[in-house]
Amino acid sequence: MKHMTKRELVYSILRLHPEITNAQLAAAAGVTKNTAATYRADFKRENANA
C-alpha cells in the first residue's frame, strides 16, 4: 500500500466532504489549521483549472 502525503490526504478528504471546516480538516489530517487552509486553497485552484 502506498503511503499518502498529508496533502494527498487533505485532497481526498475535500473530494469526499467539501463542506468540512478547516479546523475539522486539520484534525482529521493531522496538520495545522493554517496548513489545512493553504491546502484547501491549492485544491480549489488546481480543480478550477481542470
Image (cartoon, grey):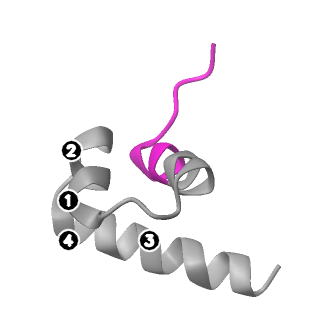
Within the magenta stretch, is there residue 6?
yes
Q: Which residue is mark 4?
A: 34
Mark 2 vs 1: CB contact within 8 A = yes
The residues tagged by marks 1 and 4 sit, at their Cα atoms, a distance apart of 9 Å
**Amino acid type shown at disc 1:** Ala
- Label 3: state its secondary structure: helix
Position of the C terminus, as image quadrant, is bottom right
Q: Earlier in the sequence, mark 2 or mark 3?
A: 2
> What separation in Å lies between label 3 and label 4 (alpha carbons)?
10 Å
**Residue occupying image coordinates x 28% and y 65%:** 22
Which residue is tagged 3?
40
2 vs 4, front mark: 2
Identify the mark nearer the N-term, 1 or 3.
1
The answer to whether residue 41 is above or below residue 19 is below
Query: What amino acid type is highlighted by mark number 4?
Result: Asn
The residue lying toward the viewer, choosing from 18 and 26, is: 18
How much space separates mark 2 and mark 1, taking CA atoms?
6 Å
Residue hosting label 1: 23
Q: Of helix, strand and loop, which one carries label 2?
A: helix
Between tags 1 and 3, which lies in front? 1
User: Horizontal placement of 38 versus 50: left or right?
Assistant: left
How many residues crowd around disc 1 within 10 Å: few (fewer than 14), some, or many (20 or more)?
some
**Magenta residues?**
1-10
Q: Residue at label 2?
A: 27
Q: Nearer the viewer, residue 11 or 21?
A: 21
- Residue kind at label 2, given as amino acid type: Ala
